[in-house]
Image: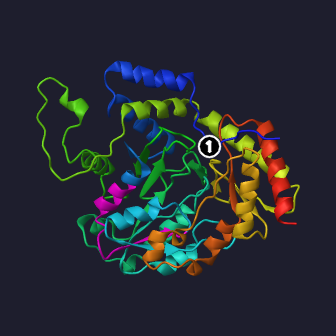
Amino acid sequence: MTRQIPFSPPRVDDKTIEAVVSVLKSGWITTGPKTRELESKINEYCGSTHSLCLNSWTNACELVLRWFGVQAGDEVLVPAYTYAATANIVIHLGAKPVLVDSQVDNCLIDYQALQAAITDRTKVIMAVDIGGLPVDYDRIMDIAKHESHQFIAKTKEQEMLGRVLVLSDAAHSFGAMYKGKRVGAQTDVAGFSFHAVKNLTTAEGGAITFNLPNPFDNGAIRAAMNISALHGQTKDALSKTQAGQWRYDIIEAGYKCNMTDIHAAIGLVEFERYQETLDKRKEICDRYTAQLQKSGHFILPSFATDNALSCYHLYQLRIRNASEMQRDEIIRLVAEKGISTNVHFQPLPLFSFYKNLGYKMDDYPNAFNFYKSEISLPVYYDLSLDDVDFICAQIIDAVNVVMQ
């Protein structure tokens, strides 16, 4: 018996289509009122002071690094266990990603190893919320403050902060909770992804939320980054349509990474029903756990810690005692039944680019041990519980064949 079950298609229905068509008919399709409305809703939802929506997490967070003055000779701490974007943006600036291993029992960054990796060249910590479960933000902020004696400022912004900047890679965790509050206001800056496979999507897109301490003016920083995202242009296209307001200035050699109102319209629909989305994802993950805990072959994912509650972005199943080859064979067998799965993530030292820079997988054993037996199962709004039961049955059958 086979079915066709994709891994994580977006939720697109008549409401989504109507919202996009409405923007198309409005005559204004680039950055405008819908994008600003989405930013306002993000601030209200996350408890942040200011936010900026852009065309991807990648460009949004690279703008943050550039604003903070990260440059050649600097170091940025990132997990070995993350998607390549986290480290790629450090490379873009000529700085060095310093990889940190995972904890022994999960894929989140090891806090002791993180603290030990800080040097007088460290400028930024980028810890990653993987699968929707937040890291311990307070502990990371405490580490950054505790190690401030090592910090050497090279720019005005670095002098004002006086320590390592904490940029939270919250690409997976929009809607997750930390100490009773939604993710987005716990660190200096947080970056969200609204890519097509994320819980809340704008097709492509991302956002940053600003929560820098005094004496920083978060509103002014947001405004400056908005200019940087539009080629250094002092007025956006909507502002220039006002009568007699065509003239603008270019005050820097900026970039081009604004979000369009077409994308924002999709996000606004998703916002209206986001709690419904989170509830359904939790129901799916709970069903997986109820079915799979009957077998001794699995290490089931955790969706909560003492401080945090996941937004159920991924169901990261691990096969107990499986080798990398055995895991891959299990994936192949369930694919024959029409089930699409994934692996989150391949640690960075497995990739040719990072290997060629000298990173060695042997230096990050916890990351590799988690990766080698991990399979991410389908989780999306339109996935039925009957399909979940089918997936579980096929996973169990495949594991029994491979691990016998």
The quadrant holding residue 26 is top left
On the image, the x and y values in percent for residue 57 come to 43, 51
Task: Answer left or right for 51 relative to 160.
Answer: right
Query: Disc 1 marks which amino acid?
Result: Ser
Instruction: Using the image, determine if residue 327 lies above or below residue 383.
Output: below
**Quarter of the image with the N terminus in it:** top right
Give yes or no for residue 355 being in the magenta stretch. no
Depth check: 318 or 246 in front?
318
Q: Which residue is the site of mark 1?
A: 8
Which one is in front, 238 or 374? 374
> Can you say which quadrant of the picture contains the C terminus?
bottom right
- On screen, residue 199 versus residue 168, left or right, reads right
Position in image of residue 364 (x %, y %): 58, 77
Tell me if mark 1 has few (under 14), some (14-19) or many (20+) residues whose alpha carbon lies within 10 angstroms of its own. Answer: many
Instruction: Describe the element under mark 1 as helix, strand or loop.
Output: loop
Q: Which residues are magenta?
A: 61-80
- Does 73 lie within the magenta span? yes
**Residue positioned 58% across, 42% down in the render:** 199
Rendered location of residue 120, percent (x, y): 36, 80
Residue 8: % across, % down: 62, 43
Point 47% across, 52% down: residue: 185
